[in-house]
Amino acid sequence: MFTDFRPNAAKILKLAYPVILGQLGIVLMGVADTIMVGDLGKESLAAVNQANNLFFMLSGLTFGVLFAISTLVSVKVGEKRASDGYTIYQSGIWVSLLLFVIQFVIMSVLIAQFHLLGQTPEVNSLAPGYLKIVVWSILPLLLFLNCRQYADGLGHTKVSMVLTFLGLGFNVLFNWLFIYGHWGFPTMGVEGAAWATLLSRWIMTILGMYYVRYSKLMLQYIEKGRISFWEARKHTIEIWSIGIPIAFQTFAEWACFAISGIMVGWFGNDPLAAHAVALNAASVTYMIVTGIATAGSIFTGNAFGEKNYYKIKHLGQITLVLIVAFELFNAALFILLNKPIANLYRVEESVLPYILPLFFLAAVFQVADGIQAGAMALLRGVKDVRWASIISMVSYWAVSLPLSYLLGVIFGDGVYGVWIGLTIGLFVAAIFGVVRFYRNVKKWEEVV
């Protein structure tokens, strides 16, 4: 394994760093929202956190379908048929439109019934207004994800990085204008953050779709303009067949986190605000790991298209080693620098006693989260998406959520019990994901 570790690790990191920066840009939008909304008070912070929990819980289904695009495109690259990737991208636009309608309808129903989640009166008052605006950002978000998955599958990961940081800049500017009412704009508070999110997502999408269609870099992959109905039908079926199991996997994970956030909301605004900050900080390191995992998935997808099973094993091992090393380093930072990190969010004094212990749990939590993210990405790269979805559903729905409820609600450990339940479920997903990847490798080696 270690004979050519350094050159292959360098290749993975070279492809990963734009993905990492792009992922960080997305997370930093959330960080910016959390910090800027946090100045309005813990009630506003809790409301935005719960609104986004609900939004991204459903997005796990729709995003998951589109995650299939990078897998399909990377396999085409391995088969020396990269130009077929553009027809997959075009089919992805139609899939995105259908996914938008589905998610919009479900979200509208949930917004109308938000009070059934049993949150505090302040959250019940603020969150639906935020969601009524953000729900219109589903379409640009899906179309941007389609662009990003296509470019990533081709190995051009810098595209989404640049666009995401542009979106981050616009998001911070619009937050400043709309939340606090600068430059003559009305002071809109929480709803101002929603408008900032909506506008910045549309800007990212318009720029992304224009780049994919007209930039010199991407024109080399376009052999023809419009695709026929039968080509679109073929690739649409491919996207759905690979994407639906991935959607179940992402939904199982994201819904687990969303429901755990709802549980924490039962304990009051202070624990919920602390939960939002700790999870937001952990998501920064998680997105770095998913960048490495995405690069590993792209390379293993190329190797899968080449039918080079030794290469799949080798690149998979290197990906997992890089992730474990990085997450252990992050765990040390979370333990040693928990208070300075917490202070960045400028939360009220009543929230800090909850945040600091959560950072110790986050140190352990993110090691498991990073390994499972890497394992699931590698399984996607070799199209083993059904087992990835089964592992996720069992780990999160049969382990994490019952344990979180048992420890947090029944045994009365509150937010800490919820986090312990989440962590145990992540370790289960990590173990079974790695075992499944190596079982695939062993099976291919026996065939060869």
Image (cartoon, grey):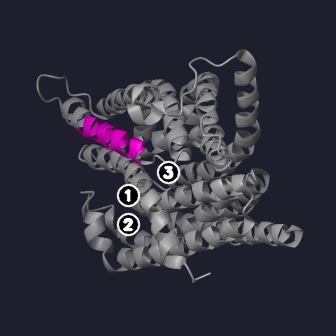
Structural distance between the alpha carbons of marks 2 and 1: 7 Å
Q: What is the crowding at mark 2: few (fewer than 14 residues within 10 Å), some, or many (at least 20)?
A: many
Say if mark 2 contacts mark 1, CB within 8 Å: yes
Residue beneath label 2, please?
355
| Circle 3: element type | helix
Residue 420: horizontal and vertical position, in percent? Answer: 58, 70
User: Mark 2 or mark 1, which has the lower sequence index?
Assistant: 1
Structural distance between the alpha carbons of marks 3 and 2: 15 Å
Residue 72: horizontal and vertical position, in percent? Answer: 66, 43
User: Mark 1 or mark 3, which has the lower sequence index?
Assistant: 3
Q: Amino acid at mark 2?
A: Ile
Q: Is residue 5 above or below residue 14?
A: below
Q: Examine the structure image and report whether residue 221 is included in the region drawn in magenta.
A: no
Structural distance between the alpha carbons of marks 1 and 3: 14 Å
Q: Is residue 251 above or below residue 378?
A: above
**Residue at horizontal 47 percent and vertical 30 percent from the top:** 219
| Circle 1: element type | helix
Question: Which span is picked out in magenta?
Answer: 158-172
Residue beneath label 1, please?
277
Q: Quadrant of the C terminus?
A: bottom right
| Circle 2: element type | helix
Say if mark 3 contacts mark 2, CB within 8 Å: no
- Disc on res. 265: 3
**Residue at horizontal 25 percent and vertical 70 percent from the top:** 340
